[in-house]
Image (cartoon, grey):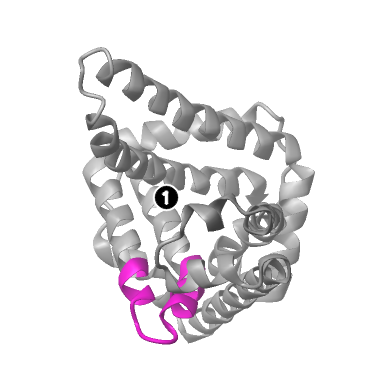
Amino acid sequence: MKLNIVPARTGWLWVRLGLRTFRRQPLALAGLFFMYITTISLTSLVPLVGNVLALALLPAATLGLMAATREAEQGNFPMPSILLSAFRAGRHRARAMALLGLLYAGAFLLLLGATALLDGGTFARFYLMGGALTREVIESATFQQAVWLAMALYLPLSLLFWHAPALVHWHEIPPVKSLFFSAVACVRNFGAMTIFALGWMAIFTGVGILLTLVTIPLGQSGMIGTLMLPTLLLLAAIFFTSIWFSFRDCFAD
């Protein structure tokens, strides 16, 4: 395995490749993404351990979407079973992916624990158990500090796990080493990763503004909420499609 250092402009190329590949197989890739969301959502409903189990499944499920993109890029139709790629590649890699999932769940729970030091666990309880938040809670300084801390801590966490599922699956890197290599790849390709993130932020923001500009002049402001959720889910499906290309270009056999 060799780490590639790519130019910063490659980040925008990853966005474009994600859009182009999604256009090739829109129904298959969108359907697989909605299966991914549904599986994680249903898993989180399991009493007591549901949310932790859902967190542990995220690396394997993300790997499945990357494998689906790889198939679509090669001109093939990705079947639903491809979402189980992480657990169909032999016992050794399945155990490694399960361990990676447990590491992710543990790290995320530590993140929530850190936020509890600021707001007494309000944000952590809301994330893990759901429920309604009052305006007073949302506007409280401690809750807002907890949210900002969660966002700040999630950035390094996402870098650790960005390439890790693919490294475990396609390069058979041990889970802990995959976290190190993933972080190094993201840092060494910081320019491309930044352009990639900014590109997707611009797309999400631009589409939101466009929906607002189209619906409000027509006197249909109530349609914004109706259209926003499916539109955001569709954009999220395309975003996950583009993740494969960031891995493909950063690592080579």
Residue at the image point whose x is 40% and y is 69% from the top = 85
- Magenta span covers which residues? 40-59
* Residue at the limit of the structure toward the front, as seen here: 136
Q: Judge left or right: residue 231 versus residue 251.
A: left
Image coords of residue 3 (percent x, y) = 73, 50
Q: How many marks?
A: 1
Q: Is residue 1 visible?
A: no
* Residue at the limit of the structure toward the top, as seen here: 217
Q: Judge left or right: residue 211 versus residue 127.
A: left
Residue at the image point whose x is 73% and y is 41% from the top = 189
User: Three-letter amino acid code at disc 1?
Assistant: Arg
Pointer 1: what residue?
Answer: 70
Quadrant containing the C terminus is bottom right
Image coords of residue 11 (percent x, y) = 61, 33
Q: Which of 208/137 is in front?
A: 137
Q: Is residue 156 visible?
A: yes
Q: Quadrant of residue 121?
A: bottom right
Q: Which of 208/121 is in front?
A: 121
Relative to 28, does residue 82 appear above or below in the rendering?
A: below
Q: Judge left or right: residue 138 versus residue 41.
A: right
Quadrant containing the N terminus is bottom right
- Mark 1 Cα shell of 10 Å, populated few (<14), some (14-19), many (≥20): some
Magenta-drawn stretch contains 161? no
Residue at the image point whose x is 49% and y is 78% from the top = 52
Image coords of residue 167 (percent x, y) = 61, 63
Residue at the image point whose x is 22% and y is 31% from the top = 223
Image coords of residue 220 (percent x, y) = 20, 23
Q: Look at the numbered disc 1 and give the secondary structure of its residue.
A: helix
Relative to 236, does residue 37 appear above or below in the rendering?
A: below
Magenta-drawn stretch contains 50? yes
Q: Judge left or right: residue 207 versus residue 193.
A: left
What secondary structure is the stretch in magenta mostly built from?
Answer: helix
